[in-house]
Image (cartoon, rainbow, N blue to C red):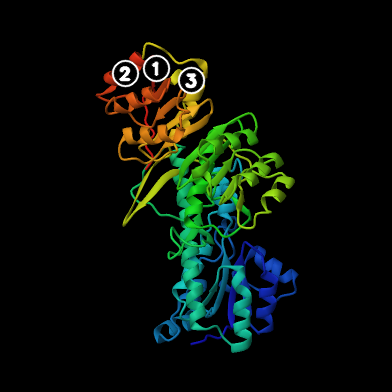
Amino acid sequence: MEIKVRNAIISVSDKTGLTELGKGLQGLGVRIYSTGGTAKSLEESGIPVIKISDYTGFPEILDGRVKSLHPKIHGGILAVRDNEKHLAQLKEGGIIQFDLVAINLYPFEKVIKKRGVSVEEAVENIDIGGPSMLRSSAKNYRFVCVLSDPADYQGVLEELGTKGGVSFATRKRLAMKVFEQTSYYDGLIASYFHAAVAENQPTYPETISMYFRKKQDLRYGENPHQSGAFYTSRSIDVMGVSTAKQLHGKELSFNNILDIESAFEIVKEFSRPACALIKHTNPCGAAVASTLRAAFLDAWDSDPLSAFGGIIGFNEVVDPGTAEEIGKAGFVECVVAPGYDDKALAILTEKKNVRILETGRISKDEAYDYDMKRVIGGLIIQERDLRDFTGEDLKAVTERNASEEELESLLFAWKIAKHVKSNAIVIAKGTKTVGIGAGQMSRVDATFVAVTKSKGRAKGAVLASDAFFPKADAVELAASAGITAIIQPGGSMGDEEAIKVCNKAGMTMLFTGYRHFRH
C-alpha cells in the first residue's frame, strides 16, 4: 500500500539536502510545516513554510526547548487512518494528518567529542521533541513516512514522483532505521552520563546497552565461510584500530581487526620507537630501539619464521628506511602506525595486497573504556589492564639484585608479557624479545617453547612470566638455558623453592605483586 503525501513536517539540525527536499516536496504540491532555523532556511530558499507555532496556536517557549510537543502535532502523526474514532477526534480538534516527517536530532554526539565541553552544554544538546516525533512517526509507519537520514531524501522523492506515493516496504525500512537511531542516541546520552558519574573509575551498572555504528563489512569472519562486520563506538575516544583509516590493500577480515589491535596496543606502551609483530593475536617479536628501523629489524629477528605473513605495529611515523626493510622481509598482512612518510607509503603500496592503516598521533590521554568479552548469551566486562610499573614497584627476593641493564630488560619483557595469551613466558635481551611462549596449558611448557624459540639466545637474557610459577620446574629450565633474571608476580606456594633455584644459579628474581593474565 502506497501513501500519498499531502502534509509534511520538516525540522532538522543537519541541513544537508534540506533545500533539495523542500523544493522536491513543494513541486509535488506538499504543504510543509516547520520550526525555527529549519523554517528560516527553507524560506530563504524560496520555499513556502507554515510555522508549527502558527498551526498549533502556541509559541515556541523556554528558549526553544518546547516547540513540537503538542497534541496537534503528535495527534496528526499518530492517528490510525482507518480508525473512524481517530479520524473523528482529528476533525473535532482541527488536527491535520501528517504523511511525511523529516527530522534529525541535535548533534549530541558531535558536541560531547569537543575538548572541554561542559555538562551544561551537553545537556542542552539532548533532543526531546525530535526523538518524540521520530518515534511517533516510526510507530505509525503504516500511514506515515519518516525520514531521519538525509541519505534517504532523494529515494523517497523519486518514489513520490514516479509512483505518486511511498511504498509500505520503504516506510517499514525507514521506521526500522529510526528505532536504530533513537536507540543509539539514547545510548550515547546514557554512556556520557555513566562516564561522568564513574569519573574514570570502574562502575558496573545493573543494565548495559551497547551502542555501536557499523564502520564496514569485513572480507569475512574468522574463516572464509563466515561473514562479518566491524562496529565502532564514536563516543569512546581511544586511539587504535577502531579509529584507524585504511590507506591501502584488501578489505579487512575479522582476524585482521583483532591482530591489528594486538599489535598497536603493544607499541602504545612505549615512548621510544617500538615495533610489534603479531600472529594470531600473540606477539612473535617485539622491540624498542633508537630508531623505528632498528626496532623493526630487532622484532623481526626474534622469530622470522612466525613473523612471515603477520601484522606489524609501530608507534611512530613510518620512514622510508623502515618501509624498505619491511619490503625486504617478505610477505606481511598489515601494517598499522600513527602515520607514514610519503616516500614510505609509496614503497609500501608497491605491494598490492598489504593492508596499511593509519591511526593518527598516539595520545596518552585516552578516554576511559572497559574491556569486554562476549560469551554465548552474555557479556563479561572488566577495567582495562593499564597498570604500569617502574623499578620502584618491584621487590627483589633473591640474594642478587638486578643490574640496571637487567632491570630495563625485565621491565620491557614484563610489558610484552601483558599482551601475550596465558600461560605466557617472554625472554628478552636488552629491549628485544628473543623467545615467546604463548597460550600453553602449563607454565613449564610455555617456558620450554620460549627457550626453544630463542635458539640459544636465552643465555644472558631475562625472562618474564605473566603469573607465578606453581613449581620450580620452569625456573630450573630457565636456569639451565642461561637466563640471568626473572620477573614474575610471586605469591605461589612454590616461591621458596623457585628462589632457592635462583640463588643456587646466581639468578635474580623480582616480584611485581600483580599478574597479567590475558585470555
Q: Earlier in the sequence, mark 1 or mark 2?
A: 2
Query: For the residues marked 3 and 2, what is the alpha-carbon distance in whole angstroms?
Result: 20 Å
Q: Secondary structure at mark 2?
A: helix
Residue 84 spot, x, y in % from top left = 41, 87
Would residue 184 be visible to someone looking at this image?
yes
Quadrant including the C terminus: top left
The answer to whether mark 1 and mark 2 are in CB contact below 8 A is yes
Please indicate whether residue 32 sits to the left or right of residue 169 in the image.
right
Looking at the rendered structure, the kind of residue marked 3 is Leu
The structure residue drawn at horizontal position 39% and vertical position 41%, both measured from the top left corner, is 421
Residue 185 spot, x, y in % from top left = 50, 58
The structure residue drawn at horizontal position 46% and vertical position 62%, both measured from the top left corner, is 228
Please indicate whether residue 19 sits to the left or right of residue 415 in the image.
right
- Residue topped by disc 1: 507
Q: Height in image: 9 above or below 495? A: below
Instruction: Specify the label residue 489 is tagged with.
Output: none
The answer to whether mark 1 and mark 3 are in CB contact below 8 A is no
Could you classify mark 2 by the number of other residues whose Cα lies within 10 Å: few (under 14), some (14-19), or many (20 or more)?
Answer: some
Could you classify mark 3 by the number of other residues whose Cα lies within 10 Å: few (under 14), some (14-19), or many (20 or more)?
Answer: many
Q: Secondary structure at mark 1?
A: loop
Q: Which is more foreground, mark 3 or mark 2?
A: 2
Q: Height in image: 320 above or below 294? A: below
Instruction: Specify the label residue 501 is tagged with.
Output: 2
Q: Secondary structure at mark 3?
A: helix
- Residue topped by disc 3: 407
The structure residue drawn at horizontal position 47% and vertical position 19%, both measured from the top left corner, is 391
Query: For the residues marked 1 and 3, what is the alpha-carbon distance in whole angstroms?
Result: 13 Å
Query: Which one is in front, 450 or 252?
Result: 450
Looking at the rendered structure, the kind of residue marked 1 is Met
Residue 59 spot, x, y in % from top left = 59, 65
Q: Earlier in the sequence, mark 3 or mark 2?
A: 3
